[in-house]
Image (spheres, rainbow, N blue to C red):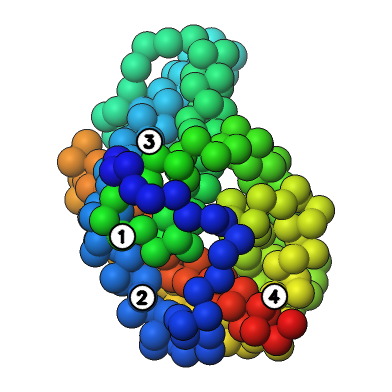
Amino acid sequence: MDDERPTADHDVDLDQPTSLDFEALLADGLDGLLSRTGAQLVVLISAIGIVSTVFWQSLQLTVSEAMITYLQENFDATDSQVQTALTELEGTVDALGLTIDISVPTIVAGIILLALLGEAINIVAIRAFADGALDGIPRDLVTRRLGVATLYGFLGGIVLLVAIGLGLLLLVIPAIFVYVGTLFFRQEIAVADKGPARAISGTWALTKGNRWLLFGVAVVLFLVGFVVPLFPGAIPGTFGTVASVFVSSIVGVFSIATITEAYVRLRRQHTESM
């Protein structure tokens, strides 16, 4: 990571574009991905993703083996349904290539710590792209209130995820409306140093009047994030798993850069209107 000039997190460059242009946002997101900063973030996120995959597959292996043992000890192995279940579980075990032999509590603790670390990197990524730092991640963006911002983003993100998830099960359109309205939740925390409540009100105000365009951007990013990783994911074995994580990291950095660029433009627009 490069040690570049510190930049005030509340500064707004009025000479930069303020309008939301669909193609320009995606182009700027691609520029961010292809920059030195983008490359650093892809490497960091990929590393976390691979280690997380190891923990998740280890947990899946432990659970699958426990279920196999339970079925063998408590049910008739000659029963066709039991045989089918055992075959499926054994196939799952054979397909898990990235595993380590550790206890379940250790696995769970590792997953939580990696999730927090991933949140911290997301915060740093947002700050870097918002600052226009494409030649490497500035050190001041890593050290500035990162612990607090990470905690806010992690806990607030869980609350929003649960709320939107429940909303999708009950009322799809209102849930999508809430998702778009809170699209800049982490940007408000990372760049404007806001707490969760103020971040939600801030993102809601910024997205007002632009939600259809932002919805279109979100749909494109969702489709890219869903479709592109399918290709390496079709490769069998450990190589396919690692390749899928790497490609997903690339798509993730592109999404962060694109959404952050939309956020920066709307902040400039809001500042000019005041």
Which amino acid lies under the numbered mark 4 shown in the image of this protein?
Leu
Which comes before the other along the chain, label 4 or label 1? 1
Q: Where does residue 158 sit, x and y in percent of width and height?
A: 69, 45
Which comes before the other along the chain, label 2 or label 1? 2
Quarter of the rendering occupied by the N terminus? top left
Q: CA distance from mark 3 to mark 2?
A: 25 Å
| In the image, residue 194 above or below residue 3 | below
Q: Are marks 3 and 2 in contact (CB under 8 Å)?
A: no
Q: Residue at x 45, y 61 (%)?
A: 131
Q: Which is nearer the eye, 9 or 184?
A: 9
| In the image, residue 120 above or below residue 101 | below
* Element carrying mark 2: helix
Q: Is residue 108 visible?
A: yes
The tag on residue 206 is 4
Which amino acid lies under the numbered mark 1 shown in the image of this protein?
Leu
* Count of numbered tags: 4
Q: CA distance from mark 1 to mark 3?
A: 21 Å
Query: Label 3: few (<14), some or many (≥20) within 10 Å?
Result: some
Of the residues tagged 3 and 2, which is closer to the observer?
2
Residue to which mark 1 is pinned: 134
Q: Residue at x 56, y 64 (%)?
A: 11
Residue to which mark 2 is pinned: 28
| In the image, residue 57 above or below residue 166 | above
Residue to which mark 3 is pinned: 48
| In the image, residue 243 above or below residue 274 | above
Which amino acid lies under the numbered mark 3 shown in the image of this protein?
Ile
